[in-house]
Image (cartoon, grey):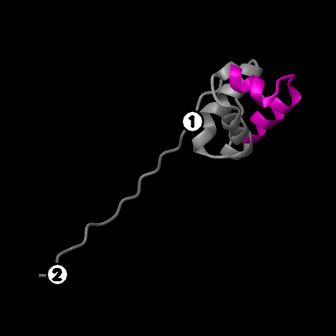
Amino acid sequence: MQHDQRLTYEELRQAAYDTLDKSPFTQADMAEKLGVSRGSVASAVHTAGSRYKRLQIQILEHLTGYTISPEQEVRFRALRKERSTG
């Protein structure tokens, strides 16, 4: 990871996986440190997406010197209301 790097969900997952894999900690160790189950840690490092982003961030923050803040892009779509035909 690099300072000010922006990550996709897949890149966040991969970073958590790689960082944990290179650390001296097992998934069980990390789970204990973060107060979650080992299965949750396993899912977080193998599953990309919004469901596990917080745990992936916690893993990375615990093992690196980085603080990771979520950025979200919100889009809106304008749709016309149906016009009455009468």
Provide residue 58's location: percent of width, then percent of height.
66, 26
42 or 22: nearer the eye? 42
User: Which one is in front, 15 or 36?
Assistant: 36
Quadrant location of the C terminus?
Answer: bottom left
User: Is 84 left, or right, of 72 in this rendering?
Assistant: left
- Disc 1, SS: loop
- Residue at 62% of width from left, 39% of height from top? 52
Residue stretch rendered in magenta on the structure: 12-32
Whichever of labels 2 and 1 marks the residue nearer the N terminus, that label is 1
Which of the 4 image quarters holds residue 5? top right
Image point 30% across, 66% down: which residue? 80
Residue 71 is marked as 1
Q: Which residue does the image show at 70% across and 19% down from the upper left?
A: 33
Residue 3 lies in the magenta stretch: no
Seen in the image, is 86 located left or right of residue 37?
A: left
What kind of residue is marked 2?
Answer: Thr
* Label at residue 85: 2
SS assignment for the magenta stretch, majority = helix
